[in-house]
Amino acid sequence: MALTLTCIEAHAEGEPGRVIVDADALVPGETIEERFAYATRELHGLRRLVLHEPRGYPGLCAVLALTPSDPRADVAIIVMEQGAFTPMSGSNTICTVTSLLETGRIPMLEPITTVTLETAVGLVSVDARCAGGRVVGVTIKNVPAFAVHLGVPLEIPVDPRVEPGTEWGQTRTVPVDVAFGGQFFVLARAEDLGVGLGPADVPALQSIGSRLKLEVNRQYPVKHPLNPEIDSINLVMITGSSPAPGIDGRNAMVMATDRLSDDPATWTGALDRSPCGTGTCARMACMHARGELGLEVPFVHQGMLDTTFTGVLVGETTVGDYPAVLPTITGRGWVTGRTEWVLDDSDPFPEGYTIGDIWPA
């Protein structure tokens, strides 16, 4: 056998996460920053193997749960999404902590077990509420979040397939925010884009999200001030309101294809099934920068499945020259299975495969 991977399958408020627990030897490096840089250079084949068919599907994410280099941490994580490696993810953190505690890989203490994660953007402390051997709630004390741009104009190509009355070759300009919430996001309001946030809007959301990601990386390049190797905007959050009582905001988060280009056939991707933890942090950072959200005020954020994360800003700080906030995110995860995935030496698809019936062309 060329490769065997032991995994715990889970989901966080609907977002599926595959936690890989025996991948240390695949990710060399003395520090998590070195290991993350190695993954982003050398391990896209592994990422595709895990997330693509026949082992994966478009909505799946995964986590490399590694031995930490920092003695203060219980586990190090590198997140694999359909389009990229990312340094931090709220839903995948919930999947990881829930999985490692419920399978005994990290000792569980009731009523609260505190788990420290080593990520490429710093240590993340997580409080897991535990009862009867189960994790019944997870609160993430995330890395600082900050706004990079607020309301800047972004020129994007139109897509006549989902924008009636337009023609190929035209462009339009929309206001967007760029923010960091554990990874970099571009955020745009659904009303500015002329799109809704319901199931019927999914084709338009996939197209618009992909075009936003494509163009924002061209027009507003980013670099994390403390970790300059984090230098791309990976995810797109389209925001709006919700008619449901007790909900402060709704979103659709688009994970664009990793083969995104000017070819309209690539303007697609998967939607986050959860309300998106790092995206919630990025949205709260933008709201705070505008004076729309104060400290210690709960922000209940709803995703496409109507599940919610609750965010709270608990302090202020700086990251480089950026004013930043200290966010927490609370949600829940569930273990859904245990798997051992195998790649045989003779397998003709060593990086898996995709077909255009359910994947980007």
Image (cartoon, grey):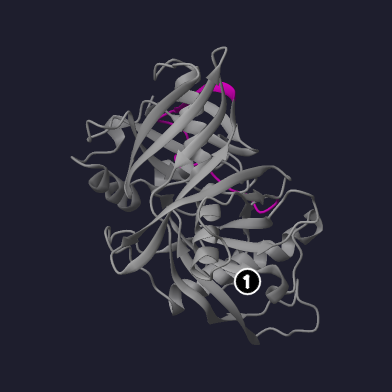
The image quadrant where one finds the N terminus is top left
Q: In this view, does 332 lie above or below 146?
A: above
Q: Where is residue 257 in the image (x, y as percent from the top left)?
A: 55, 58
> Left or right: 71 with respect to 304?
left
**Residue 309 point in image, percent of width and height:** 61, 44
What residue do we see at 33% from left, 50% from top? Answer: 121
Residue farthest toward the top in the current orientation of the protein: 132
Furthest toward the left, the residue is: 30
**In the rendered image, which quarter contains the C terminus?**
bottom right
Q: Does the magenta stretch include residue 165?
A: no
Residue at image coords 80%, 78%:
164
Magenta region, residue range: 335-357
Q: Where is residue 124 in the image (x, y as percent from the top left)?
A: 37, 41
Q: Does residue 354 belong to the magenta stretch?
A: yes
Who is closer to the viewer here, 130 or 219? 130
Provide the secondary structure element on which disc 1 rests.
helix
Quarter of the view holding residue 145: bottom left
284 shown above or below 312: below
Query: Which of 349/17 is in front?
Result: 17
Picture layout, residue 287 above or below residue 133: below
- Between 57 and 150, the residue placed more toward the observer is 150
Q: Mark 1 points at which residue?
A: 264
Residue 101 appears in the picture as rendered? yes
Helix, strand or loop for the magenta stretch, by majority: loop
Q: In this view, does 357 lie to the left or right of 40?
A: right
Can residue 348 be seen here? The reply is no
Instruction: Measuring from the top left, give residue 323's x and y in whole percent.
Output: 37, 66
Q: Is residue 80 left or right of residue 74?
A: right
Quadrant of the rendered image containing residue 66: top left
**Residue at image location 43% in from the left, 28% down from the top:** 344
Label 1 crowding class (10 Å Cα cut-off): few <14, some 14-19, many 20+?
some
